[in-house]
Amino acid sequence: MVTAAGSEPVSFSWRDRLGLLAAALSGMAVQLDWLAVDLALDRIAHDFAQSDTDLEWVLTGFMLAFVGLLPVAGWLADAHGRPRTVIQGTAVFLVGSIGCALAPDAAWLVVGRVLPGAGGALVAPGSDATIAGVFHGRCKSVAFGFVMGAAGAGAALRPVVEASSRSSVGATSSSSTYRSASSRSP
């Protein structure tokens, strides 16, 4: 039950709570996926004996697929059902992530990053549209706040995770430079 000053309480059923949790975790996973790859890019460059410039496509492939497929994903969610599209997007995201983990070389990794981007694109509008279609009034506002807050938390965790990761990985990695995404050359 959620209450705000001077308003009536908002309550969600267990089924609603599970749906909100799934939407929140999927949004957070997309944010953290991009973070994890960006943090590991120097190590990936070292392991695959590639330059940072060559591996920029690891990040770019994800973002191009994500942004390019958002309109199509919205149409698919409307045409084939929002929950179904979210589940399929999560499956594509998971399969792509496993493929990336098993990539034998940089080329496969770059190609593999497109799948999580496509899966993330299917998840984003499907989750939002499901919330908009299922919840009404104040419940909708609270639901959107929870889901967007989780995605925002994934993005906000970036500096904390980045700092702790770089200090611990920097001590054991043979790669000498660790830079943030904003300081990478295009």
Image: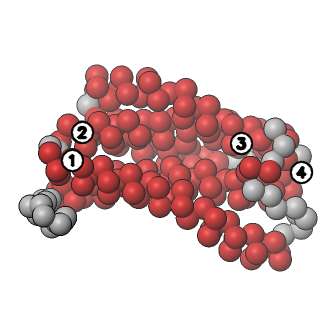
Q: Residue at x 80, y 51 (%)?
A: 183
Residue 99: x, y in percent? 61, 46
Cβ–Cβ under 8 Å for marks 1 and 2: yes
Q: Quadrant of the C terminus?
A: top right
Cβ–Cβ under 8 Å for marks 3 and 2: no
| Occupied quadrant, residue 145 | bottom left
> Would residue 47 be found to the left or right of residue 152 on screen?
right
Can you tell which mark lies on residue 132? 2
What is the three-letter code of the residue carrying label 4? Ala
User: What's the CA distance linking mark 1 and mark 4?
Assistant: 49 Å
Q: Secondary structure at mark 3?
A: helix
Q: Residue furthest left?
A: 8
What is the three-letter code of the residue carrying label 3? Val
| Mark sitting earlier along the chain (1/4) | 4
Q: Residue at x 62, y 39 (%)?
A: 62
> Would residue 28 be found to the left or right of residue 107 on screen?
left
| Mark sitting earlier along the chain (2/4) | 4
How crowded is the residue under tag 1: few (<14 C-alpha within 10 Å), some, or many (20+)?
some
Residue on which the image places disc 4: 49
Residue on which the image places disc 1: 140
Residue 114: x, y in percent? 61, 36
Q: Residue at x 32, y 29 (%)?
A: 77
> Would residue 48 be visible to someone looking at this image?
no
How crowded is the residue under tag 2: few (<14 C-alpha within 10 Å), some, or many (20+)?
some
> Would residue 118 be found to the left or right of residue 78 on screen?
right
How crowded is the residue under tag 3: few (<14 C-alpha within 10 Å), some, or many (20+)?
many
Q: Nearer the viewer, residue 54 or 182?
A: 182
